């Protein structure tokens, strides 16, 4: 996940005109974003299962349960849900080709959230091991 975040950061550090000038930039950023959300959901599911609960049915539910377990900050929950919604938009129905700026701006805004996510997971795992 750290590598995907780093790559996404490099792409979104470009100016928007640079970003949208290359189809490769857009698709790489979209794919990295998708994979970050999916990896987080997989990690969430494993931790939730380890806690003796059932596997969450949705990305949203996985983040909600992680906040309930106090592994993720509950104040960040709306942002995690928004990021999973953006992932769903990318994958299922909608196309950002008309307005790549929405995706660019959103992906850039979610980077710190997922850097904090990694720190929260590390903290949880350190406590669990001790």
Image (cartoon, helix red, strand yellow):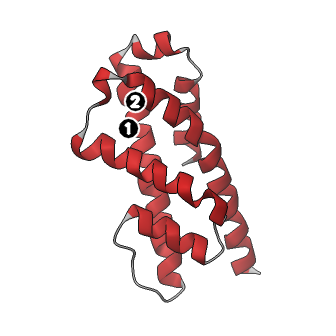
Callout 2 crowding tier (Cα within 10 Å): few <14, some 14–19, many ≥20: some
The picture quadrant where one finds residue 74 is bottom right
Tell me whether the residue at label 2 lies in contact with that at label 1, contact meaning CB atoms closer than 8 angstroms.
yes
Identify the residue at image location x=47%, y=10%.
17
Residue 63 lies, with reference to residue 92, above or below; the image says below
Secondary element type, mark 2: helix
Locate residue 50 relative to residue 75 in the image: left or right: left
Secondary element type, mark 1: helix
Question: What percent of the width, then of the height, locates residue 21?
Answer: 40, 10
Instruction: Compare residues 92 and 29 and report the one nearer the observer.
Output: 92
Q: Residue furthest right?
A: 130
Callout 1 crowding tier (Cα within 10 Å): few <14, some 14–19, many ≥20: some
- Per the image, the residue denoted by label 1 is 31
- Residue 28 numbered tag: 2
Instruction: Compare residues 27 and 66 and report the one nearer the observer.
Output: 66
Instruction: Compare residues 96 and 128 and report the one nearer the observer.
Output: 96
From mark 2 to mark 1, how far is it between C-alphas? 5 Å
Q: Quadrant of the C terminus?
A: bottom right
Residue 57 lies, with reference to residue 9, above or below; the image says below
Locate residue 108 relative to residue 28 in the image: left or right: right
Question: What percent of the width, then of the height, locates residue 12?
Answer: 54, 25
Residue 96 lies, with reference to residue 35, above or below; the image says above
Identify the residue at image location x=39%, y=35%.
30
Q: Residue furthest bottom?
A: 52
Identify the residue at image location x=57%, y=26%.
10
Locate residue 74 relative to residue 78 in the image: left or right: right
């Amino acid at each position: 996940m750290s590598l995907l975040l780093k790559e996404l950061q490099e792409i979104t550090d470009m100016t928007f005109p640079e970003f949208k000038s290359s189809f490769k930039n857009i698709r790489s950023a979209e794919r990295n974003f998708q994979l970050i959300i999916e990896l987080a959901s997989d990690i969430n599911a494993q931790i939730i299962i380890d806690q003796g609960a059932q596997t969450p049915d949705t990305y949203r539910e996985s983040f909600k349960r992680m906040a309930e377990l106090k592994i993720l900050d509950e104040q960040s929950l709306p942002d995690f849900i928004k990021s999973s919604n953006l992932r769903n938009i990318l994958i299922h129905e909608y196309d950002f080709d008309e307005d790549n700026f929405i995706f660019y701006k959103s992906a850039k805004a979610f980077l710190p959230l997922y850097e904090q996510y990694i720190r929260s997971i590390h903290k949880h795992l350190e406590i669990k091991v001790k």
